[in-house]
Every structure is written in C-alpha cells, then in structure tokens.
Amino acid sequence: MKTMRITRRAALALTLAALPGAALARGDFSGFVETLWPRARAAGVSRETFEAVAQNLEADASLMGLRAKQAEFSKPLSAYLAEAASAGRASRAQAQARSHGSALSQIESRSGVDKEVVLAIWGMETDFGRDMGNRDVLRSLATLAYAHPDNPVYGDEFIAGLVMLEKGLAERAQMKGSWAGAMGNPQFMPSAYLKHAVSLSGGAPDIWTSVPDSLASIANFMKNSGWIAGSPPLVETRIPDGFDWSTLKQSFGAWSRMGFRDIDGDALPSSGEAMLFLPAGARGPALLLGPNFFVLKAYNFSDSYAAAVAVLANRIGGGAGVRASWPKDDGLDAAGRSRIQTILKQKGFYDGKIDGRFGPITRLAVHAYQKSAGIAPADGFPSKALLARMSN
C-alpha cells in the first residue's frame, strides 16, 4: 500500500468514515467532480481528457462504511511475520527470481536496491501479482474525495490519475486497482506512478502486466526514498551480558563497542545509526533497525511492514526468519497502547498522536519513562504490567 503519505494503498492508514449517504442521495456527485476541473486544468489536463472521465462517472456506494483494516498496525509482530514473511512466500519469490533473473540483476545494478528486497515488496503488496485489485481507480478516488472534502489527498490523487491519461501513460481501462486507489503490481497511487514508475524496455512504464517494469519501479521508489546500497535494514542480535539499557538508539559502531553482534556472532555493519527494537520485550527477539529500515517505511509507514520486508528478503536470499523464540504475548490492544500514550503525554515524555500505534517515537518515550521510574529492563515495550504501573 503506497504512501498516502501518499503514494500507496498501505499508506491509507487512515480509518475511513462512512460516506455521507444523504449526500449521495442528493445526486450532486457529478457537481462535486466538476469542482475539481480548475485543479486538473492547472495540472495540465485538457478539458477533453477531464470530460472523458467525468462524464457519467458515478459515486461508488460500495465504499460506504468501508474501513481500512491493516494487520500491520494491529497484529503482534510474531503473528504478522508468520504470515507476511512465511517460508511459502519466500519460496514463491525464489521462483520469481529464477524467472526474472536477468531483469533483477539489471535493476539491482542500476538502483543499488537488493533484488531480494524488491521481490519481498512485490510479494507483500500483491503476492506476486495475484491480488492487484480490479476496481476503477479513478472512480474510487473521486468517491473518496467527495466523501472527505476536508482531506485533499484523494482529490490530488484523482487529478494525478488524469495527468497519467493526459500524458498517454495508461489507458483508462488499465487503471484498475484497490478500493483505495492503489494500482498494479507495486500498488502505486497515481502520484507515486508519476514520480517513481520506470520502464526497462522504454515507453510508458507498465506496472500492470510487465513484471520487469513493476520490479524496476519498486526499486526506483526505494532509490528515490534514500536507499543505501549494501546496508541491511534489519539485523537480529542478542542482548549482551551487562547491557545497562541506557539507550535504544546509537551508531552501529557504538553498539559493537557495547558487545553487540549479529545473531550468528558476526560483526555488525560498520556505518549508520541503529535503533534497538524489542518487539516482544526484553525476553523476546532483539532487532537492530538500520537506516534502510526507515527507508522501507516510505513505502508503508508500519514498523511491522518494514520488518516483514526485511525478514522476507533475508529468507528469499537463503537465510532464516527471526531466530530467537517469541515469549507468550504480553502486549496491549490499541486501547491499551492509546492509554500508555496518553499517560506519557501527561507526564511530558511524549508529544505525538494518541492513536494506539507504537513506532520509534513512542518506544523511545516509553524507554525514557522506564529509566526515569527506575524500571528495568528499560526495553521500550508497552506491556500490560507497564500500563498497570503507569496507571497507579
């Protein structure tokens, strides 16, 4: 799902409210679409192109009440990885690697993005083209823009789709995808297509039927987002004896000096900053998140998604999944995580959104609270025990 933050289906991380049924009944949808014409004209869209889409365009009533349910923001990481980065998916990716080896080598050489990462993203997005969606993307985007007039994203994406048509980059019938407007193998929103899509063979990038173009476009997205060639996004590690939990974020070199190594005892990368992530607390796996982990979040802002891409890429390359055992889940539901965020904000440790989603900012806030309260280990993990203590 592609940065909605604004380029992808996943990035529609917003929960959609019900469409205004009364407004649909008024039959003013076509009037609303017409209000988008000045913005489309300013973007270089001809009246002919605009009318070809707008004429007889009807709101998609099936989007009424539809809510975005994203497992990457709700499932425990252990359960999410078991499905998203499974051995079966890795095996299917390896078969794709054999089929498209020449294109992948060319893409990796040009972009600096590991072919395993490109394949992992393709697998995560559409299961290698099996599930690209079959909705009329422009109809969906126009409907969402109509339903959410206070959110300019949907209208912007609708206009970006018109620009694609104006430039001859796609045929109207091609523009099929998810209900949220994401298209093709990479699940690009129209703006992402315009910014990142490339073709290996020349001509308009075909992210619907050309696997090489789709893979090259994914790699180009990552390159444009700041991918660092040769830097692993995630390194599984072990907590060394005597670690004082004074920090969760420092350079790989500093982690090495503290006695950290990868899970096999080999040296850590020599450069870059890394955050220590304990997705099940100090008793579970320990992951060092490098700079490319946060580049992966440009594709989908979820930590779980980025972790799954990294783990799946490792499995595609012949490695293993997460090696350490996962303890019995002691994590909180969204309401509990929101409660922790609220308390952290009240105590001055956190200044972000109260949304029940735990990313690096919230984990660092938990870590700071744990240190201030003398809680050991200060692992940044939102456990039930931590919430009970904070609530007293």
Image (spheres, rainbow, N blue to C red):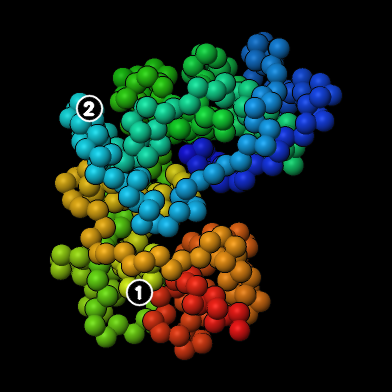
Residue lying at 38% horizontally and 53% vertically, measured from the top left: 79
Secondary structure found at label 1:
loop
Q: Secondary structure at mark 2?
A: loop
Which of the two residues, 341 or 226, is positioned nearer the viewer here?
341
Residue found 54% across the figure and 82% down from its top: 389
Q: Are marks 2 and 1 in contact (CB under 8 Å)?
A: no
Q: Amino acid at mark 2?
A: His
Does label 2 or label 1 sit earlier along the sequence? 2
| Left-right relation of 289 to 321 | right
Q: Which mark is residue 326?
A: none
Q: Is residue 297 above or below residue 257?
A: above
Gap in angstroms between the C-alphas marked 2 and 1: 41 Å
Residue 43 falls in which quadrant of the image? top right
Look at mark 2 in the image and give the residue it sits on.
Answer: 100
Image quarter of residue 118: top left
Q: Which mark is residue 282?
A: 1
> In this orientation, does residue 369 appear?
yes
Dot 2 alpha-carbon crowd within 10 angstroms: few under 14, some 14 to 19, many 20 or more: some
Residue at 72 percent of width and 35 percent of height: 19
Q: Residue furthest front?
A: 328
Classify residue 220 as left or right of residue 101: right
Please give left or right for residue 251 compared with residue 330 in the image: left
Give amino acid for label 1. Ala
